[in-house]
Image: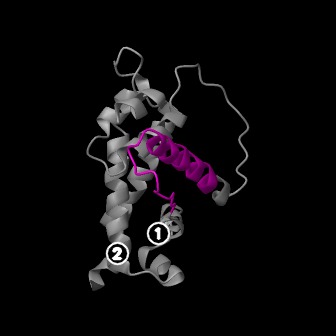
Amino acid sequence: MRKVLLVKGFLDEDGTLTQKGSILQRLKNVKYEIVLAEVLCLFVSFKPFKKHNIRCDGFMDHVNNVKNIFEDIFNCEKHYRVLPGDAEFKFNYNEYSDPINGIIMGDELDEVATTYGTSLPALLKVVKELLNLCKVLLNVSEMKENVKDKIQSVCNSLNDILKNDISMLNY
């Protein structure tokens, strides 16, 4: 595992934590922490913030980018025998990602559950898990402030949903 951490940049040649490694250390109680740390490092920079015109080509492009990162980590773990040599890469698209996107955009929980054919209690559980993850992410000090602001905005929206959604009175 040390070799994987070294190759992926979580440790330097001396074995001390890098900026990326300190993010991983803060996420030690989160499921799939090594993958999440790798993804979070895409948002970390000590360069001065410059405005860019970013055009979103679609959600699936983003999913494919994340899939590529997961696959790189998988291949690295396989190469250094963290995983068995016959292991196969699998990437599961989270069935709740579209409903969560709808919730964050302001749709009611019961409306989203009906639209996507999901169970309302299961959807509520996913909202709570996402809220907990957002709270963990807010404690990553190396992340840029504009990213933290956006995560805080999502966190506030999820808190409001859990506090104000009267559709849960039926359950």
Query: x%, y% of residue 161?
Result: 38, 64
Q: Are marks 1 and 2 in contact (CB under 8 Å)?
A: yes
In the rendered image, the vertical position of residue 90 relative to residue 150, given as above or below:
below
Asked where in the image residue 12 lies, by quadrant, the reply is top left
Residue named by callout 2? 122
Q: Residues within 10 Å of mark 2 (few under 14, many from 20)?
A: few
Q: Nearer the viewer, residue 165 or 102?
A: 102
Per the image, label 1 sits on a secondary structure element best described as loop
Quadrant (top left, top right, bottom left, bottom right) of the C terminus: bottom left
Residue visible at 37% across and 79% down in the picture? 120
- The image's mark for residue 96 is 1
**Amino acid type of disc 1?**
Tyr
Per the image, label 2 sits on a secondary structure element best described as helix
Quadrant (top left, top right, bottom left, bottom right) of the N terminus: top left
Query: Is 79 a magenta residue?
Result: yes
Residues in magenta, as a range? 62-91
Could you tell whether 54 is left or right of 79 in the image? right
Whichever of callouts 1 and 2 sits on the residue coming sooner in the sequence is 1
Query: x%, y% of residue 131?
Result: 35, 55
Cα distance between the residues tagged 1 and 2:
9 Å
Q: Nearer the viewer, residue 123 or 78?
A: 78
Q: Is residue 41 visible?
A: yes
Identify the colour scheme used. Answer: one colour
Residue visible at 52% across and 60% down in the picture? 91
Residue visible at 43% across and 28% down in the picture? 20
Query: Is 53 a magenta residue?
Result: no
Could you tell whether 97 is left or right of 60 in the image? left
In the rendered image, the vertical position of residue 22 relative to residue 101, given as above or below:
above
Q: Residues within 10 Å of mark 1 (few under 14, many from 20)?
A: some
